[in-house]
Image (spheres, grey):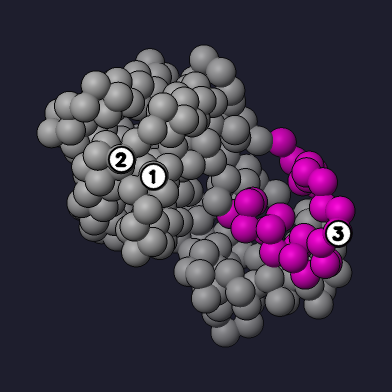
Amino acid sequence: MVFIAGYREGKMQHDSDAGKSATTITYERLKKAILSLELLPGQSLAERSLESLLDSSRTPIRAALVKLETEGLVRKGDRSYSVAPIELDELEQAFAFRALLECSAVREAAAVATPNDISRLRALAMESSASSHEVEVRAPKAEEFHLEFARIAGNVFTIRALADIMRVVYRARWLDLKADKDDVGSREHNAIIDLVEAGKIDQAVAMMEKHVAHSRDRLLSAIKSQAQGFRMRGLKVVS
């Protein structure tokens, strides 16, 4: 099995699965492998190989594949499934929509944020920084950081929409975090929090817009610089 640089071959390492059904465990493991790029875009998902990788049987694997197909993370061919490709045109559209959602969430959250909310944001910013953790930990914490503004604002529709768009860009964000060697994203996270805490709402919104744009630019640059290698792995690179 081929993994992106930095990953090792062998069975996945798992968190506690106590109390979960075999189907749920298999679904969560397979989804994590796809989102974290352990399973690459375009990679074939042969059931026999997945049995070994996920330490599961075929019935839960088939159920997981069906569910992940509805989420857009896998695609069904004539005979088998494969990991859905990451497409640049879709990513650019997703980032444009993400910027609208996040700027709205920051504006609403800044008007109602409590000291406890600020503390929670700072904790998430620290946990998603390059100085604190590896990408495997940073990526989900960075996602939580961005979703937290929508939660603070209390707008359920923004929360749902942002969660959906984060799913679209999540795999690609691993590439962004790997490319952000200077931890610019983490510094921008803290700058946004500082502005929200100071009540400088317009400036906080402007910083979030800048932050999302920087993330998009790093990601697209990382992908385009490695376009040939990614195409060989199923990534659709659209000029």
The residue shown at (42%, 42%) is: 148
Question: Which percent across, then down, holds residue 119?
Answer: 46, 25
Secondary structure beneath dot 2 equals loop
Which label's residue is closer to the chain start, 2 or 1?
2
Distance (Cα) linking label 3 and label 1: 31 Å
Which label's residue is closer to the chain start, 2 or 3?
3
Classify residue 111 as left or right of residue 178: left
Classify 117 as above or below 26. Answer: above
Q: Are marks 2 and 1 in contact (CB under 8 Å)?
A: yes
Q: Which mark is residue 152?
A: 1
Classify residue 206 as left or right of residue 186: left
The residue shown at (21%, 27%) is: 199
The answer to whether residue 188 is seen in the rendering is: no
Classify 50 as above or below 127. Answer: below
Name the quadrant containing residue 113: top left
Distance (Cα) linking label 2 and label 1: 7 Å
**Residue nearer the viewer, 221 or 35:** 35
Which residue in the protein does label 2 denote?
112
Q: Are marks 3 and 1 in contact (CB under 8 Å)?
A: no
Q: In the rendered structure, which amino acid carries the disc numbered 2?
A: Val
Classify residue 105 as left or right of residue 165: left
Q: Which mark is residue 64?
A: none
Which residue in the protein does label 3 denote?
19
Q: In the rendered structure, which amino acid carries the disc numbered 3?
A: Gly
Q: Which residues are magenta?
A: 8-34
